[in-house]
Amino acid sequence: MNIGDVATLSRLPAKTIRYYEDIGLVKPLRSANGYRTFRESDAHRLAFLGRARALGFSIEDCRSLLALYGDEDRASAEVKEIAELHLDRIDEKITELTEMRATLAHLVDACAGDHRPDCPILADLAMECRGEDQLEKSA
Amino acid sequence: MNIGDVATLSRLPAKTIRYYEDIGLVKPLRSANGYRTFRESDAHRLAFLGRARALGFSIEDCRSLLALYGDEDRASAEVKEIAELHLDRIDEKITELTEMRATLAHLVDACAGDHRPDCPILADLAMECRGEDQLEKSA
DNA sequence: GGTTGACCTTCCAGCCAGTGGAAGCCCTAT
DNA sequence: ATAGGGCTTCCACTGGCTGGAAGGTCAACC
């Protein structure tokens, strides 16, 4: 298989696949003309990578997961630990975004959104009275 | 004020403040020794930036928001539009993360996490049977 | 006057995970 | 023979910083 075929199969851009080779995640053979030649196992690895990335795992997580996948003597606990850490990171992000969302939604709601210049969104961003403990110290 | 003072006030790292100058978000004066000298208005802008960034606005959004803030003739509608677009982006991210979270939580839940190698997380990532429509075509 | 140490300066490199584009082979079909 | 599509490498760029090196400046202390 050439890179285009495996790109279609894995739904990863060819560029990404070359990048994955660069960083050692996949090691296709080369045919006489210099083209990359992907075996079934390479295609399989790329599909694995595509799904792991779609779940938000970092490239380094993917590397570890692939290593565990190829290790017959792995303990599922090792896999689970990676997944749980990732889950925690996702939860943190969701929490952070949800807080942002709440604040922002509140401000958007309060803004008339008309031709007049008065705007509670800008007023909030420009607010002097946060970080007052710091200001007091230096005052 | 030197950069350290304004860094403390705005709770932004000095490096970040230098970067903001680089990209034209803030324009401090220079004193004879080459040190940046921040006016009250610069400190104010940096605080504004810190809060806008904390709400997840992109640097380019921040640039627009600062311009609107300084424009007496702005319409609040312009501010609101930026905020609403950002809100939509946040909602998209939350949705995406929530979907990931659900899938991942399901898999983590199904994994024994013991010394044995069997692992539904890896099994899912390695699954052949997704993207079957594509596979069928090329088969 | 010398020295420490905290502060400041610039510049260059790197992070993550790719993406875009140029310049140039290779292969097939007409 | 030539047009097109696919493949190759390489370099630069994205966002939003962050780290570190090499060196200038300033206030305090001995």
Image (cartoon, coloured by chain):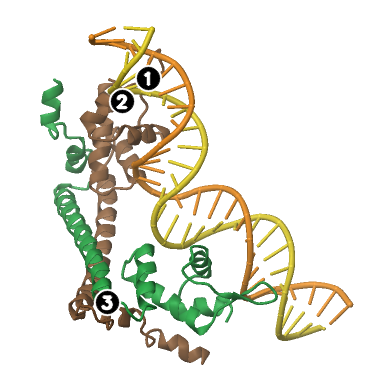
Chain colours: A brown, B green, C orange, D yellow
Instruction: Answer left or right for A67 relative to A5.
Output: right
Image coords of residue A50 (percent x, y): 25, 39
Which structural element holds mark 1?
loop
Residue A69's image quarter? top left
Residue type, numbered disc 2: Ile
Q: Nearer the viewer, residue B120 or A17?
A: A17
Instruction: Answer left or right for A64 relative to D25.
Output: left
Which structural element holds mark 3?
loop
How many angstroms separate mark 2 from mark 1 (CA)? 8 Å
Mark 2 touches mark 1? (CB < 8 Å): yes
Does residue B115 appear in the picture of this structure?
Answer: no
Within 10 Å of disc 2 (Cα), the crowding (few <14, some 14-19, many 20+) is: some
Marks 3, 1 in one chain = no
Within 10 Å of disc 1 (Cα), the crowding (few <14, some 14-19, many 20+) is: few
How many angstroms separate mark 3 from mark 2 (CA)? 52 Å
Q: Nearer the viewer, residue A24 or A14?
A: A14
The residue sitting at 14% across, 26% down in the picture is B135
Within 10 Å of disc 3 (Cα), the crowding (few <14, some 14-19, many 20+) is: some
Which label was assigned to residue A35?
1
Q: To which residue does mark 2 refer?
A: A3
Image coords of residue A35 (percent x, y): 37, 19
Which label was assigned to residue B26?
none
Q: Earlier in the sequence, mark 2 or mark 1?
A: 2
How many angstroms separate mark 3 from mark 1 (CA)? 57 Å
Judging from the image, mark 2 belongs to the subunit labelled A
Image coords of residue B27 (percent x, y): 53, 72
Judging from the image, mark 1 belongs to the subunit labelled A
The residue sitting at 65% across, 77% down in the picture is B31
Q: To which residue does mark 3 refer?
A: B75
